[in-house]
Amino acid sequence: MAAADLQGKYQKLAQEYSKLRAQNQVLKKGVVDEQANSAALKEQLKMKDQSLRKLQQEMDSLTFRNLQLAKRVELLQDELALSELRGKKNKKSGESSSQLSQEQKSVFDEDLQKKIEENERLHIQFFEADEQHKHMEAELRSRLETLETEAAQHQAVVDGLTRKYMETIEKLQSDKAKLEVKSQTLEKEAKDCRLRTEECQLQLNNLHEDLSSRLEESLSIISEKVPFNDTRFSQYNALNVPLHNRRHQLKMREIAGQALAFIQDLVTALLNFHTYTEQRVQIFPIDSAIDTISPLNQKFSQYLHENASYVRPLEEGMLRLFESITEDTVTVLETTVQLKTFSEHLTCYVSFLRKILPYQLKSLEEECESSVCTSALRARNLELYSDVKKMTAVFEKLQTYIALLALPSTKPDGLLRASYNSVLTHIATVLQEFHDVMKDISMHYSQKATIEHELPTATQKLITTNDCILSSVVALTNGAGKIASFFSSNVDYFIASLSYGPKAAGGFISPLSAECMLQYKQKAAAYMKSLKKPRLESVPYEEALANRRILLSSTESREGLTQQVQQSLEKIAKLEQEKEHWMLEAQLAKIKLEKENQRMADKVKNASGAQRVQNTQENPVLVNATIQDQEESADKAWQEPIQSNSLVGMLVMTSDSEVPDVESHEDLIKNHYMARIVELTSQLQLADSKSVHFHAECRALSKRLSLAEKSKDSLNEEMKVASQNISRLQDELTTTKRSYEDQLSMMSDHLCSMNETLSKQREEIDTLKMSSKGNSKKNKSR
C-alpha cells in the first residue's frame, strides 16, 4: 500500500510538474511579448517627447514674436496719436506745411516698413540660429553620454584585464615556486632511486645466486628421488586430476538444463503431432466411424499409435545426461557417458521415422487420388510429400553426428580430436536445416488446412483435428528454432571447452582413464575435506559493512522515527475522534433497538393473548397440550446454541422464540461488535505500523544507496587521480632518468677531457724538467 501511495504521489507530482512547465513556457512567451511592447512604447514615448519639445520651442518663439509685434503696434499707435495731435495743432498752419508733412510721413512710412522687414528677418535668423544651437547642443550631449558610457565600459574592461593579468602573474609565480620545490624533491627522489637501484641490483644478484643454487639442488633431488615423469607419457598423464573449474561446470550444467527444457518442449510437440496425425488418418479421406479405411492407413495408424514408446525415451536420455553433469565432475566428451544412451534413443526414433515414412507418403498419395481432392489440395500434398522426406533426412543427419559425438566416451579411436570442431559445426547447420524444414511444413500444412476447411465434405471433427495438427507443427517449429539458436550461440563455448582436461596434454585418452581420474578426484576431495578445520567465529565482512552503513544513516533514521512518531500521534488523535463518534452512534442505535424490542414485545403479547382466549373457548384441553409443547420446545431451543455468521464475524447465541430476556441479547450483540471493532482496529494499527516501518526501511535503503553511490563516485575519482599521478610520476621519473644519464655522460666526457689536459700538463712538466736538467749540466760543464 505504501509503495502504491508513493507511486501515486510521484505520478501526481509529475503531472503537476508538467503543468507548471507548460505554464512557465506560456508565461515566458508573455513576458517576452510584454518586454517587446514596453520597448516599442518607450520608443514611441521618446518620439512624442521630442515632438513635444519641438512644439514647445515653436510656441515659445511665437509668443516672443507676438510680444515684439504687440510692443511694435503700441509704439506705432502712440506715434499715430502724437501725429494726430500734431496734425490738429498744425491744421491752422498753411498748405505748404501740410505738403511738407505728407512727404515726411511717406518717408517715415517707408523707413518704418524697411525696419519692420529687417526686424522680421533678424528675428527669423535669430530663431533659426537658436534652433540650430539647441539641436547641436542636444546632439553633442547625446554623443557625450555615449562616449562616457563607452569610456566606462572600456575602463571596466581594462580593470578586469589588469585584475586577470595580476591573478595570472600571481598564479604563475606560485606555480614557479611549486615547480622549484618539486624539482628539489625530484632531485632527492632521483638520488633515492639511484640508491634503491643499487640495492635492487645487489638483491637481484643475491636472488640469482640463491635461485641457481636451489635449482641445482631441486634438479639433484628430482634426479635422485623421482622415478619417472608421468607428464611425458599421455597414458599416465590422463590419470592426473586436472584443476577444478567450477565456473565451467556450472556453465555446462546451465546449458544442459536449457537443452533439457528445449528437448521436453520438442518431445511434447512430437507426441502431439504423431497423435493428431493418427486421428486424421482415421477420419480423412474416409471416416472410420462410417466406413472402413484402407489397409495402408490402418497399418499407418497402428504404427503411429506406438509413437510414445519411441519419443518419450528422448526426454529420459536427456534427463540422465543433465543429472550426470554436476559441480564435482569434469564434463568433457570423454566423461559424458550418458550421451551414448541419448544417441541410442535418437537412433530408435529415427528408425521409427524411417518405418512410418513410406506409409505416410502412400497416405498422401491416397489423399491425392480421392474424389474430394482438388488441384490446389493436390499441390499442397505434393509439397508436404517432399517436406516429410526432408524432415526424415534431417533427423538421420542429426542422429549420425550425435552418434559421432558419443564415440569418445565409448570408443576413443572412432573419432579424432581434430574432428570435434567440424562435428559441432555440422550439428549447428543440421539444426538450422531442421528449423527451415519445419517452417516449410507449417506453411504448407496451414495452406492445406484452409483449403480442406472450404470443402463441402469437411466435418467439424476434421477441422478440429487439422487445427490441433497445425498447433503441434507450430510448436515443433518454435522448438526447432529455439534449439537451433541455442546451439549456434553456444557452439563456440563447446569448441573452447573441448580442451579442458589434464595439464600438458591434449585431453583424456580413453573413457577408462577418465573414470579412474574421477575416482582419484573424489578421493582427493574427501582427503581435503578431512583436513579442513573449522575457523574461529568472527563477524562477517558483509555484516560489518551493513553495521557501518547503519551507523552512518543513524541520524537520518532518527529523523525518520520522529516523523513516524508525529504521524502516529496524529493518527491516534483521529482514531480518538472516530471512537467518540462511533460511541455516540452506538448509543443512538441502542436506544432505537430498545424501542423496537419493546414495540415487538407488546405486539407479541397482544397477539398471543388474543389467540389464547380464542383457543380456550374452542378446546381447552388442546390449548393446554399446545402450551406445554411450546414451553418444552422453547426450553430446548433456549438450551441449544445457534451460530450466526456474517461479515462482521461469527456470533454464538441462543434462540428464544418468546424473547424472555431482551437485555441479554443486546449485551451479547454489543459485546460481539465491540470485540470485532477492537480486533479490526488492532489489525489496522498493525498494518499502519508495518507500512510505516517498511516506508522507513525504504527511505533508509535509498539513503544508503545514495551514500554508496557517492562513495563509489568519490573512489572512482580518487582512482582516476591516483592513476594520473602514477602516470605523471612515471613520466617525470623517465625524464629525470634521461636528464641524469645525460648529465652523467657529460660529466664522464668532462672527466676524460680533464684527464687529457692533466696528461698534457704532466708531459710539459717532464719536458721542462728535462730541459732544466740539461741546462744545469751545461752550466756545470762551463
Image (cartoon, helix red, strand yellow):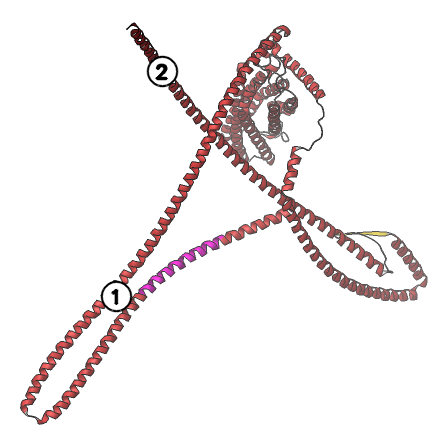
In the rendered image, which residue does mark 1 sit on? Answer: 134
Does 23 lie within the magenta span?
A: yes
Say which residue appears at 53% left-offset and 51% top-offset: 15
Spot occupied by residue 404 in the image (x, y as percentages of width and height): 57, 16
Spot occupied by residue 385 in the image (x, y as percentages of width and height): 52, 24
Does 618 lie within the magenta span?
A: no
Q: Which residues are magenta?
A: 21-48
**Vertical placement of residue 589 versus 169, above or below:** below
In the rendered image, which residue does mark 2 sit on? Answer: 756
Q: In which quadrant of the rendered image does the C terminus lie? A: top left
**Vertical placement of residue 774 versus 460, above or below:** above
* Farthest residue, direction right: 621
**Vertical placement of residue 25 versus 217, above or below:** below
Q: Nearer the viewer, mark 1 or mark 2?
A: 2
Badge 2 amino acid: Glu
Q: Which disc number belongs to residue 471?
A: none
* Secondary structure found at label 2: helix
Spot occupied by residue 553 in the image (x, y as percentages of width and height): 63, 43
Disc nearer the start of the sequence (1/2): 1
Task: Tell me the CA gap for discs 1 and 2.
Answer: 95 Å
Circle 1 crowding by C-alpha within 10 Å: few under 14, some 14–19, many from 20 = few
Splitting the image into 4 quarters, where does residue 600 fall? bottom right
- Is disc 1 in contact with disc 2, using a CB cutoff of under 8 Å? no
Q: Image check: 546 left or right of 103?
A: right
